[in-house]
Amino acid sequence: MASLIDAIDVKRKMYFEFENAPYYCLDVEVSTPTARGGQTLVRLKMRNLLTRAVFDKTFKAGEKFKEPDLETVEASYLYSDGDGSYFLDQTTFETLTLSADRLGDALDFLTEGMIIQLDKYNGNPIAVQLPATVELKVEYTEPGVRGDTASGGVTKPAKLETGLEIKVPFFIKNGEAVKVNTETKEFAGRA
């Protein structure tokens, strides 16, 4: 039996279950009343881990939440097709499938064999956690013109092996590996 968490005890970056769905707490605001007999209220900014929706909701301090059955496993990316994307659990060697709507834009960063963290809720995969930066090869970019240097911040578009297009410095060539920030989708350096 999962333990119960009081609403007043929910902190930032905590996971809890509400209305049979897992949530992640983004922010907490506790308001204590000045009048005697008033109830302490807890306002939570929370993200539904199944739908990725973010919203605010106010609870009474004594309301209770279950601890969700969440697990993070190491998995390697195999491939994607019309039915979804496939991952291999590195512990059980079970093939896990995630639909495109659960992945969001993670496909822009996934290459075959890449090891990532996969979140499971009640044993079913629900999301992937990408590292802060990933290394991807430049598939095509225009050649830099002689005299172009790293200084000056001049950039050019580059298409990466996953199909993602980013801006890179002029000195980057075709076939070169670059680091890409997974949050901002920006060039983060040479690999």
Image: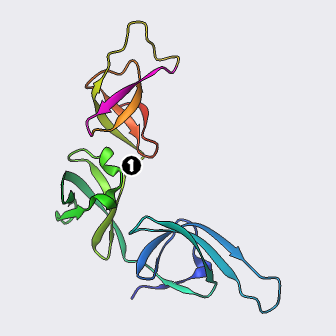
Residue 59 in magenta stretch: no
Residue 87 can be seen, yes or no = no
**Where, by quadrant of the figure, is residue 19 drawn?**
bottom left
| Side (left or right) of 4 relative to 27 | left
Rendered-image quadrant of the N terminus: bottom left
Three-letter residue code for mark 1: Pro
Which class describes the residues within 10 Å of circle 1: few (<14), some (14-19), or many (20+)? few
Horizontal and vertical percent for residue 114? 25, 47
| Side (left or right) of 18 relative to 108 | right
Magenta range is 153-162
Residue 85 can be seen, yes or no = yes
**Rendered view: 8 above or below 100:** below
- Which residue is at a point 54% across and 86% down the rendered structure image? 64
Report the number of discs: 1
Frontmost residue, 84 versus 147: 84
**Where, by quadrant of the figure, is residue 33 drawn?**
bottom right
Rendered-image quadrant of the C terminus: top left
Secondary structure mostly seen in the magenta stretch: strand
- Which residue is at a point 42% across and 40% down the rendered structure image? 185
Horizontal and vertical percent for residue 118? 31, 61
Horizontal and vertical percent for residue 16? 48, 76
Q: Residue furthest right?
A: 35
Residue 158 in magenta stretch: yes
Disc 1 marks which residue?
131
